[in-house]
Amino acid sequence: MPELPEVETIVRQLRPQIEGKTISALRLFWPRSVEGVPKEFRHRVRGMAVAAVARRGKYIGVEGADGTFFTVHLRMTGKLVMELGAADRRHLRLQFTFTDGTKLYFVDARKFGRLHLWPCRGESCPGLGPEPLRAETVRRVLKHLKTKRPVKSALLDQTILAGIGNIYADEALFLAGTHPLTPAASLSDGQQRRLASVIPQVLRQAIRRRGTTLRNYRTVADESGENREHLNVYGRAGEPCPACGTAIDKIRINGRSSHYCPDCQKMRSVTSDK
DNA sequence: AACAGCACCTGTAGGC
DNA sequence: TGCCTACAGGTGCTGT
């Protein structure tokens, strides 16, 4: 569910809530929410003094004063909340208790989310591409793409850029005027530039609105994000394009739905766009 | 290399 | 009301 802006929102809220606190106990209600051996996870995390909370791609990283490090990936429906609502009780998978008596709950209806003893921090995070929050970074990555796969698939590939998911990929491609099926390596200079400038904008704008809530996503304070009403194409199949009025189309690319305006996002050849 | 298909899971919306 | 199907913000695996 959550993409970079949602995870960033969660991290920003989580930080003041748990930094400086010490984990005194944890209860695991769905063992498979923990990657690896749950016993080892419990052993390492109990007693941990939380020194820092950070984000890398769609991962939340929690670092202890002694260097212990674990990540949380929320996948589709995971959330972290400080208060457990009545409706969330049945989806409670893991509960942290701090020495001051406060609690942090990991709630996950679909059970896809994972916690992992994994030192994924900063640039040293195996398997993840760079953060897409700066136009020059994105531009550099796009420039070196040699693959013919659809640009939409490339944007969703976390080893290329870390943090972009289905919503923001569609939104960025719309704003760049690029058809999602355009082969990644055939983007013209102009298209690369537009996409590179638009991706950080879309993500930062969403962060300012505390993310996009379609259904399950909630912040640590259990609020909805406010970005949904600002989406141009995602989830708007059949509705008029905000720019030209043409009906938004929805197709499937690599098993994921892709929303785009057939008029504003035409496939064009490299030569015609120079 | 890159795709499809499936697995992991549950909830919800829509058709009948 | 209930049954059935399709689909959902993600990722990882297998087979082709």
Image (cartoon, coloured by chain):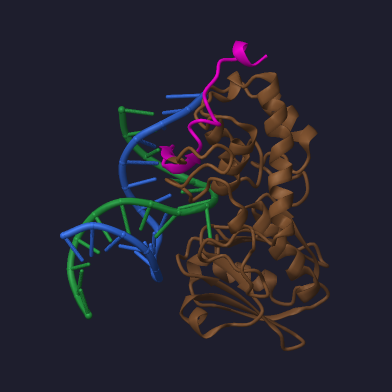
Chain colours: A brown, B blue, C green
Q: Nearer the viewer, residue A215 or A246?
A: A246
User: Could you say where residue B1 lies in the image, as x and y percent from the top left?
Assistant: 52, 24
Q: Residue at x 56, y 30 (%)?
A: A151
From the image, which quarter does the C terminus of chain A lie in?
Answer: top right
Say above or below: A116 vs A244.
Answer: below
| Left or right, residue A123 beside residue A177 | right
Q: Residue furthest bottom?
A: A101
| Left or right, residue A101 beside residue A26 | right
Q: Nearer the viewer, residue A255 or A91?
A: A255
Say above or below: A6 vs A97.
Answer: above
Q: Which residues are magenta?
A: A250-274
Q: Would you identify the image quadrant in which residue A157 lies?
A: top right
| Left or right, residue A106 beside residue A97 | left
**Does residue A132 show up?**
no
Q: Residue furthest top?
A: A271
Q: Is residue A26 magenta?
A: no
Q: Is residue A251 magenta?
A: yes
User: Could you say where residue A150 lies in the image, as x and y percent from the top left?
Assistant: 51, 29
User: Could you say where residue A272 lies in the image, as x and y percent from the top left?
Assistant: 60, 13
Q: Residue at x 76, y 74 (%)?
A: A18
User: Could you say where residue A91 lies in the image, as x and y percent from the top left?
Assistant: 48, 75
**Does residue A35 show up?**
yes
Q: Residue at x 67, y 72 (%)?
A: A220
Q: Residue at x 62, y 45 (%)?
A: A164
Q: Nearer the viewer, residue C11 or A65?
A: C11
